Image (tube, rainbow, N blue to C red):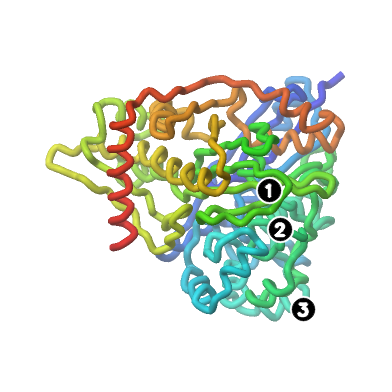
Amino acid sequence: MAETAILSIDQGTTSSRAIVFSQGGDIIALEQKELTLFYPHKGWVEQDANDIWDDTLWAMRQAVKDAADKGYEVAVAGITNQRETTIIWDRETGAPIYNAIVWQDRRTAAQCQALKDAGHEASITQKTGLLLDPYFSASKIAWILDNVEGARAKAEAGKLAFGTVESFLIWHLTKGQGHYTDATNASRTLLMNIRTGQWDEALLDLFNIPKSMLPEICDNIHDFGMIAAEYLGEAPPIGGAAGDQQAALIGQACFTKGMVKSTYGTGCFVLMNIGADFKVSQNKLLTTIAYQIDGQKTYALEGSIFIAGAAVQWLRDNVNFFAKAHESEALALSVEDSNGVYFVPAFTGLGAPYWEPDAKAAILGLSRESNKAHITRAAIEAQAYQTQDLMAAFLADSGGEIATLRCDGGLVSNGFMCQYLADILDKPVELPKITETTALGAAYLAGLSAGLYTDLDDVSGRWQRDKHYSASMDAQKRNTALDGWKKAVAQVLFT
C-alpha cells in the first residue's frame, strides 16, 4: 500500500518548484527549475507565462514520479505563488496575450501617482488595506489592456481572463474547467474590498477593468478542481491555494493574534496576525487577508521589503563578488564590520514603511580601504535594518511588543544574517525545522481540505523549532548602527 502524500506547487519569482510532503510534513521529493526574468526597459520586470506553466508542470511530474518510486501516492495538491504578478490570457486557447508582469515592475508608477494626485488613495486603502502603488495588480492589468493591440476590445467582449499566478495555474491544471483565485491573492490586486470579500465595482471602474475578466474569489481551502489525469497519470484534487507570504504564515503556524513571521527570499515580507477585525495601518503598512477558511477572514498587517536575497543575487550576478550565493556569508565574516559602509538595496524603489517608488539603490560610506567584503557585509546587514524599520511600524500600529520572530526563506541559511537580525531587533529569531514553510503552508491547506489534518490546532502542534538566535549586541552599538542606516536611507529618499 502506498503512503499518502501531498503535492505542493510553489511557483516563485525566481523558480518554479514542486514538493511532495508526507502527511507528517517531511519532504519526500523536491524538484525545481530556475525562472528567467526579463528587463525590457528600465523599471520593467517580466516573465514568460508559458515558461511558468511548462516549468511548473515539469517540476510536478518529476517530484510525483520521485515520490512514487519511494512508495508515496499524492492524495491532494495545494498551490502557493508569487503574488501580484499579472497574467492575462485568451479564454479559448489559454495562451497569454503578453508576458507576465512581475510584482517588482514599476512601469505604472506615473499612472498610480496621477490617481494619488486626484485624491483616490485614502478611499482605496479603506477598501483594500493597500496603498496606491505599481506593486499591485490593478494598474498592471490596465497597462496590458491599453498597450496590447486588440486587448481591450477582447476583454470587453468577455474573451480574456486575468489571474495572478495561482489562478493561471489552476486554469491550466484543470484544462480550463475553473477560473478561481483565493482570498489572499485576490486581496493583493487592489480590486477586492477585503471587508466584504468581493470585487469592488468602483475600483474596477477607476482602473477601467471589465469584471468579466476576473476569477471567482474562494476560501483558501476549496475544491479548485481536479488536475487533469494526462499531466500526472492520476487526477488529485487541488484543495488549497494561498499567496506565498500568507502560505508562509500558515506554514509557520502563526494562527494566534500577535504572532509574526518574516520570509527572506527575493524580497522580505513580514506578516503579523491581527485577528478577525480589519484595521487600516497608520504607519504605511498594508492590511491584507492572512487566510480565509469557512468564509471567516483573518487579517494581517504586512510590511513589504522589495529587495532582500535579491541584493545577494545582484552582488553575485552583476558585479561578480562571488560565484555562489552561500559564499556571501564567509565573505561578510572575513571582516570585523562593514567599515561604515551602508547598502540601501532600493533597486525597485523602497517598500514599507517608505513607499518611495522612485528611490534608487545606493552604496554609501565608501572609503579607500573599502572592499567587496565590506560591501557584501553591508548588503546582508541591510536586511536587519529594513526589518527593524518594519518592526517600529508594527509596534506603532499594534501597540503590542513582538516577543519572537519566526523566520524562513532562502536567506535564513546565512547564519550571519540571522544573528545580525536578532542583534538589531534585540529579539529572539527562530527558524523552523522544516524551512520550506511557504510550500508547507500550501500543503497544510490541501491536507485540511482532504481531511488529513483536523483543524488549525492540529497544524499548529506540528511546528518545531530548529535554530534559535538571541541578541548579543550592546544597546549603544545597536543605536549607532541604526542611526547610520537612517542617514543612508535619507540620502536615497531625498536625492
Q: What residue sits 54% from the left and 38% below the top?
A: 262
Residue 322 vs 358, above or below: the answer is above
Q: Residues within 10 Å of mark 2 (few under 14, many from 20)?
A: many
The residue beneath circle 1 is: 299
Q: What residue sits 53% from the left and 45% below the top?
A: 394
Q: Position of residue 491 (x, y in %)?
A: 28, 56
Q: Is residue 400 left or right of residue 40?
A: right
User: Amino acid type of disc 1?
Assistant: Tyr
The quadrant in which residue 385 appears is top left
Observer-side mark, 1 or 3, equals: 1
- Residue 157: give its label: 3
User: Amino acid type of disc 2?
Assistant: Ile
Q: Position of residue 413 (x, y in %)?
A: 47, 28
N-terminal label among 1 and 3:
3
The residue beneath circle 2 is: 194
Q: Is residue 62 visible?
A: no
N-terminal label among 1 and 2:
2
- The residues tagged by marks 1 and 3 sit, at their Cα atoms, a distance apart of 35 Å
